[in-house]
Image: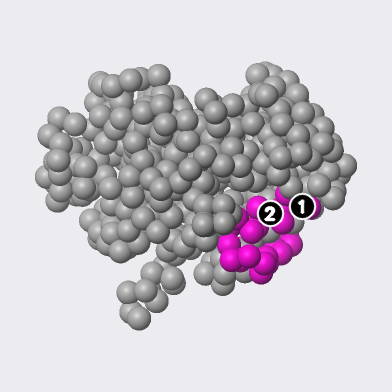
């Protein structure tokens, strides 16, 4: 469903845009119009802030990882605690914002894609809260890896559709969700979970996730009287990372570091291409098709990345590095043992790189790691990996 219509807006450098069928472009144009109308609307903002506080539990802490910092013996490491949000990850920030928009647009049916299941759980939660029909597409392999999250979604009233075509992973779930939207756009709102997809989704997701850096910037100045040396966040599609970066992008002295799985190194080895209706840096196989990817963290298992990340990489504003599954597994256990905080496997990639970097820096340096989610969903998988 690529390349049939090209919109000139929604670009970050050469990346982004909207490469979709004409009928879907009409839907996206309406979505953009409504988003621009409501994002600065005082009533919308008041309602969003109400639910951020009373339902999600924000603002969440910026926790000094005292024991980990001492063990590493380098830069001070702070954790932005998205793991403390209702539903256990950053995904609810965006799901809540989009569901309030869907409500104002008169939508009755919500569809979404999910990898690790956290966006699916967040979407199902928001749909339960606002009484909407909810359909979640999830790769068959991911439904097996994250069976507990599938049960959570069903418990919340969602219909979970396993996608077995292709690799049965996140990319294939997105394909199915976009196909559903083309068929049912007259009554369906696609609540996209990452900073990917055709315009206006990357901009919209960034807007709702930027609450992360809005808070952390204020919190680090309150705690330390200065900005951090670097912000570190895991990057799959890139929603938690763009949220963690957003309010620092113009702060040129703050390093922005996205951490990818070494098994799916999109920004290290990818090339510009169109995937899922937008242009970004993408891992391609020898036939020019999106390359099969695998990460121990289902939420990082995507062959592309958000268009703004592609731009931040090519413009040199942000650095993107890789961490192996084994390194992430070790960081998962180390943070659990030193701080009593069990991180998601996705977040563990960022923790692993922060540990490496902290050792190279002085004790005056400050690192903020976006702890994008908690590891409840991963403990069974980690148990199997450790004990196999």
Q: Residue lying furthest right in this view? A: 186
Report x, y in % for residue 262.
36, 55
Helix, strand or loop at label 2? It is: helix
Give the CA separation, mark 2 to mark 1.
Answer: 6 Å
Report x, y in % for residue 146.
54, 66
What segment carries the magenta color?
A: 151-180
Depth check, front residue: 333 or 281: 281
Asked where in the image residue 75 lies, by quadrant, the reply is top left
Q: Which mark is on residue 58?
A: none
Report x, y in % for residue 355.
22, 48
Depth check, front residue: 270 or 317: 270
Compared to residue 296, the image places residue 99 above or below, namely above
Helix, strand or loop at label 1? It is: helix
Q: Residue at x 30, y 26 (%)?
A: 254
Q: Which mark is on residue 175?
A: 2
Q: Is residue 258 left or right of residue 185?
A: left
- Crowdedness near tag 2: few (<14), some (14–19) or many (≥20) residues, C-alpha within 10 Å: some
Residue 128 visible from this viewpoint: no
Q: Is residue 110 left or right of residue 370?
A: right
Mark 1 lies on residue: 179
Report x, y in % for residue 315.
41, 27
Compared to residue 309, the image places residue 355 above or below, namely below
Q: Residue at x 33, y 79 (%)?
A: 387
């Amino acid at each position: 469903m690529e390349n049939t219509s090209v919109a000139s807006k929604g670009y970050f450098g050469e990346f982004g845009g909207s490469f979709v069928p004409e009928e879907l472009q009409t839907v996206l144009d309406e979505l953009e119009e409504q988003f621009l109308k409501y994002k600065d609307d005082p009533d919308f903002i008041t309602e969003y802030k109400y639910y951020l506080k009373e339902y999600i539990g924000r603002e969440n802490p910026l926790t000094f990882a005292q024991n980990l910092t001492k063990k590493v013996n380098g830069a001070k490491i702070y954790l932005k605690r998205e793991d403390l949000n209702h539903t256990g990850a950053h995904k609810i920030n965006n799901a809540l914002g989009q569901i309030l928009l869907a409500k104002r647009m008169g939508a009755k049916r919500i569809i979404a894609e999910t990898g690790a299941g956290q966006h699916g759980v967040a979407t199902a939660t928001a749909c339960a809260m606002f009484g909407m029909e909810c359909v979640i597409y999830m790769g068959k392999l991911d439904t097996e890896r994250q069976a507990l999250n599938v049960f959570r979604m069903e418990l919340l009233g969602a219909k979970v559709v396993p996608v077995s075509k292709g690799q049965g992973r996140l990319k294939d779930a997105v394909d199915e969700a976009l196909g559903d939207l083309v068929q049912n756009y007259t009554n369906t709102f696609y609540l996209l979970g990452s900073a990917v997809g055709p315009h206006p989704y990357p901009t919209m997701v960034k807007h709702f996730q930027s609450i992360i850096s809005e808070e952390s910037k204020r919190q680090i100045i309150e705690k330390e009287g200065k900005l951090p040396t670097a912000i570190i966040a895991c990057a799959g599609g890139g929603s938690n990372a763009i949220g963690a970066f957003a309010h620092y992008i113009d702060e040129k002295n703050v390093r922005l570091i996205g951490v990818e799985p070494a098994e799916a190194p999109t920004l290290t080895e990818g090339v510009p291409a169109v995937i899922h209706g937008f242009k970004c840096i993408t891992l391609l196989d020898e036939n020019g098709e999106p390359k099969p990817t695998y990460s121990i963290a289902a939420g990082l298992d995507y062959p592309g990345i958000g268009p703004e990340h592609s731009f931040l990489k090519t413009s040199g504003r942000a650095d993107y590095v890789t961490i192996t599954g084994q390194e992430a597994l070790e960081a998962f256990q180390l943070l659990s043992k030193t701080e009593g905080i069990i991180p998601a496997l996705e977040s563990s990639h960022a923790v692993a790189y922060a540990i490496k970097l902290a050792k190279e820096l002085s004790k005056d340096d400050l690192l903020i790691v976006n702890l994008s989610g908690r590891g409840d969903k991963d403990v069974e998988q980690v148990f199997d990996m450790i004990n196999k």
